[in-house]
Image (cartoon, coloured by chain):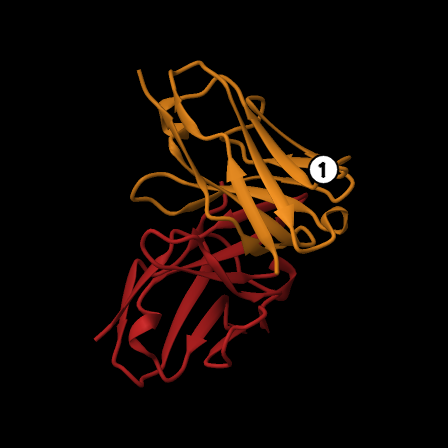
Chain colours: A red, B orange
Amino acid sequence: QTVVTQEPSFSVSPGGTVTLTCGLSSGSVSTSYYPSWYQQTPGQAPRTLIYSTNTRSSGVPDRFSGSILGNNAVLTITGAQADDESDYYCVLYMGGGVKVFGGGTKLTVL
Amino acid sequence: EVQLLESGGGFVQPGGSLRLSCAASGFTFNNYAMSWVRQAPGKGLEWVSTISKSGDSTYYADSVKGRFTISRDNSKNTLYLQMNSLRAEDTAIYYCAKDYNFESHANWGQGTLVTVSS
């Protein structure tokens, strides 16, 4: 059973930079997993931020960026703002039409 | 503007059935794969199922395989999820999503709540 791992929580100061990671319980994440990232605030539908590792979805500010760093996919937020306080989920594509979500990271901006 | 409007959620007893619908507009529906994603109360997101743009290929999470069926009617720009043999653990908000190919989700509906309880 493949498990996609994320930090349960993270905090960042306003104006600061934070890097959230998305890994595998076994093995390394590569571009072949087409990592994608989603933002969700409580009570709202998810919003797509990044797909195919590093492509920003329409309307997403360039403060959000995605990449592969070491064995993980990462989402970097620069110049953190109060309304970035949300849950962030990554998804890895396992092939055969199957996608797996990570458990999500709760980001606090304080 | 892409719009996805889910409907069909509600309260059902364990073992029962429910069919969700997702009405799509603002894009060429038959050019995109579509998915269902769910979120149990207080929990994270879980991919449920994906269907190809033509409807001839379908994919399911192990947790719903054999019980749920995804389908689409491209003439009506509508996506469906037929849910049978429902269990308490299927209680969740169900989101419809337009996909970037099969690998990731592009746009999301607002969701419809399914509650399975006796």
Q: Nearer the viewer, residue B17 or B26?
A: B26
Q: Residue B61: x and y, percent?
A: 55, 36
In the visual, does A61 lie left or right of B76?
left
Q: How many marks?
A: 1
Q: Find residue B86 and report its image quarter.
A: top left
Q: Residue B102: x and y, percent?
A: 67, 50
Name the residue rendered at 31%, 54% in the picture: A42
Query: In the rendered image of this protein, does residue A107 appear above or below residue A1?
Result: below
Classify mark 1: helix, strand or loop. loop
Q: Nearer the viewer, residue B53 or A22?
A: B53
Name the residue rendered at 44%, 76% in the picture: A76
Tag 1: residue type? Lys
Residue labelled with disc 1? B76
Q: Nearer the viewer, residue A103 or B79?
A: B79
Q: Find residue A77 and report its image quarter.
A: bottom left
Q: Residue B17: x and y, percent?
A: 50, 18
Subunit of label 1: B
Name the residue rendered at 38%, 55% in the picture: A104
Q: Residue furthest left?
A: A110
In the visual, does A79 lie left or right of B78?
left
Query: In the rendered image of this protein, does residue A97 appear above or below residue A10?
Result: above
Q: Residue A25: x and y, percent?
A: 44, 52
Query: In the rendered image of this protein, does residue B50 appear above or below residue B68?
Result: below
In the visual, does B11 lie left or right of B25?
left
Q: Considering the image in quadrants, where does the N terminus of chain B appear?
A: bottom right
